[in-house]
């Protein structure tokens, strides 16, 4: 007698026969151009930081699976994505031992403690970066200039700092466009922002390459276009209103979209299928919250950047958005409250 079985797996649940591994693999392909440009911009520093964060993430996932006596899940590429996103969100001069700690935290605290892929409440890479931001505030806000002539032949002294030792940074350093504007009132041209001719985290500098990766995933139906559009549109509208009110005090909306980690966060982090809503309207609300919170933190917060905290806060309320914006079952009536 032929037995039929129903296979139930963790989210994301995508139709057309696509497996989780296939989706995650395509995200990795989409991230590779961002990785290549970061190495081109910052040289060996970026390569080592990204590799260390990714290696630590994969190693931690494999180790936790082994001690739990489960089959290793490193082949689903989710740990690779966590490591890549973490490395791309770190400064290129970030000490390697701190990047390694971040990779461990992202998998252990941001993912595995919730039950693994499909159960994590927050984006694991952002959980790791939030912990690193609190633990090493100086290291994570110390920037390295892009396109130095010796970037492929030398390594920053801070990169090789021994664990628990204070990093020693090179004499030359570069401010990000956001920090330059927030604290010094200096603006950066649109062309420099779009083509990555700036300082910043290893993977946030070239907005065009990031956007092309998002278009690739949307075209392959492996990413909801509503989230990045909602994030960028809400950020553009709020910053545009502020710019119209006082163009001398507030930066242009184009500057807000192309600077910092907004593009990277909107395309690759906010769109995490596990920690984002599933209803169409919920996706718009979720993305809008991220965009608005990012601008609020950038303008009125103590930090020059707010993407990380905006996405984590939106992750926290994502289940509540779905519970409020849930579809009515066909053929049923809405409940009428008794008077």
Image (spheres, helix red, strand yellow):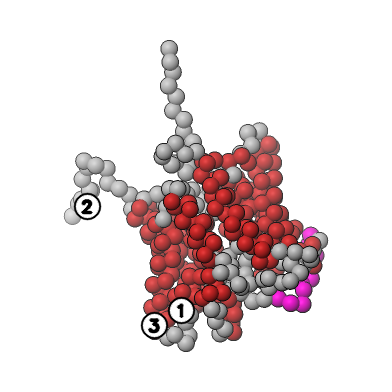
Q: Which mark is residue 244?
A: 3
Percent position of residue 141, x then y? 65, 71
Q: How many marks?
A: 3
Q: Are there few (<14), some (14-19), or many (20+) residues within 10 Å of tag 2?
A: few
Mark 1 or mark 3: name the one nearer the start of the chain.
3
Q: Relative to the observer, which residue lies in front, 15 or 315?
A: 15
Image height check: is 299 above or below 135? below
Residue 9 falls left or right of residue 162: left
Proximity of marks 2 and 3: CB atoms separated by less than 8 Å? no
- Secondary element at tag 2: loop
The magenta segment: 163-173
Q: The N terminus is located in which quarter?
A: top left
Q: Nearer the viewer, mark 2 or mark 1?
A: 1
Mark 2 or mark 1: name the one nearer the start of the chain.
1
Mark 2 or mark 3: name the one nearer the start of the chain.
3
Q: In 3D space, how far apart are the residues under numbered discs 1 and 3 (Cα atoms)? A: 9 Å
Q: Nearer the viewer, mark 2 or mark 3?
A: 3
Q: In 3D space, how far apart are the residues under numbered discs 2 and 1 (Cα atoms)? A: 47 Å
Which residue lies under the disc numbered 1? 252
Identity of the residue furthest to the left in this view: 339
Percent position of residue 235, x then y? 43, 69
Q: Residue at x 68, y 66 (%)?
A: 42
- Secondary element at tag 3: helix
Percent position of residue 195, x then y? 56, 69
Query: Is residue 324 visible in this depiction of the protein?
Result: no
Q: In 3D space, how far apart are the residues under numbered discs 2 and 3 (Cα atoms)? A: 44 Å
Q: Relative to the observer, which residue lies in front, 149 or 283?
A: 149
The answer to which quarter of the image holds residue 192 is: bottom right
Which residue lies under the disc numbered 2? 337
- Secondary element at tag 1: loop
Image height check: is 281 above or below 165? above
């Amino acid at each position: 007698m032929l037995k039929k079985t129903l296979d139930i797996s963790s989210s994301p649940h995508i139709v057309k026969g696509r497996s989780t591994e296939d989706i995650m693999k395509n995200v990795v392909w989409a991230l590779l151009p961002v990785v290549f440009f970061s190495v081109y911009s910052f040289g060996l520093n970026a390569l080592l930081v990204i590799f260390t964060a990714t290696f630590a993430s994969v190693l931690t996932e494999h180790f936790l699976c082994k001690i739990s006596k489960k089959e290793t899940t490193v082949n689903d590429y989710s740990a690779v994505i966590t490591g890549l996103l973490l490395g791309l969100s770190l400064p290129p001069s970030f000490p390697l031992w701190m990047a390694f700690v971040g990779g461990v935290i992202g998998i252990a605290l941001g993912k595995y403690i919730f039950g693994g892929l499909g159960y994590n409440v927050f984006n694991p890479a952002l959980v790791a970066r939030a912990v690193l931001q609190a633990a090493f505030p100086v290291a994570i806000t110390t920037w390295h200039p892009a396109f130095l002539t010796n970037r492929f032949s030398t390594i920053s002294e801070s990169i090789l700092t021994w664990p628990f030792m204070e990093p020693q940074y090179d004499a030359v350093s570069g401010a990000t466009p956001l920090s330059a504007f927030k604290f010094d009132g200096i603006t950066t041209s649109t062309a420099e922002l779009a083509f990555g001719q700036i300082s910043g985290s290893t993977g946030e500098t070239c907005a065009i390459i990031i956007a092309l990766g998002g278009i690739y995933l949307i075209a392959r139906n492996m990413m909801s276009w509503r989230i990045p559009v909602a994030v960028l549109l809400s950020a553009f509208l709020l910053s545009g209103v502020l710019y119209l009110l006082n163009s001398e005090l507030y930066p242009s909306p184009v500057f807000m979209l192309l600077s910092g980690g907004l593009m990277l966060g909107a395309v690759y982090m906010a769109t995490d299928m596990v920690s984002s809503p599933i209803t169409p309207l919920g996706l718009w609300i979720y993305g809008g919250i991220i965009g608005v919170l990012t601008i609020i933190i950038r303008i009125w917060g103590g930090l020059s950047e707010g993407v990380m905290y905006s996405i984590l806060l939106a992750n926290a309320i994502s289940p509540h958005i779905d519970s409020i914006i849930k579809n009515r079952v066909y053929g049923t009536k809405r409940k009428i409250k008794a008077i």
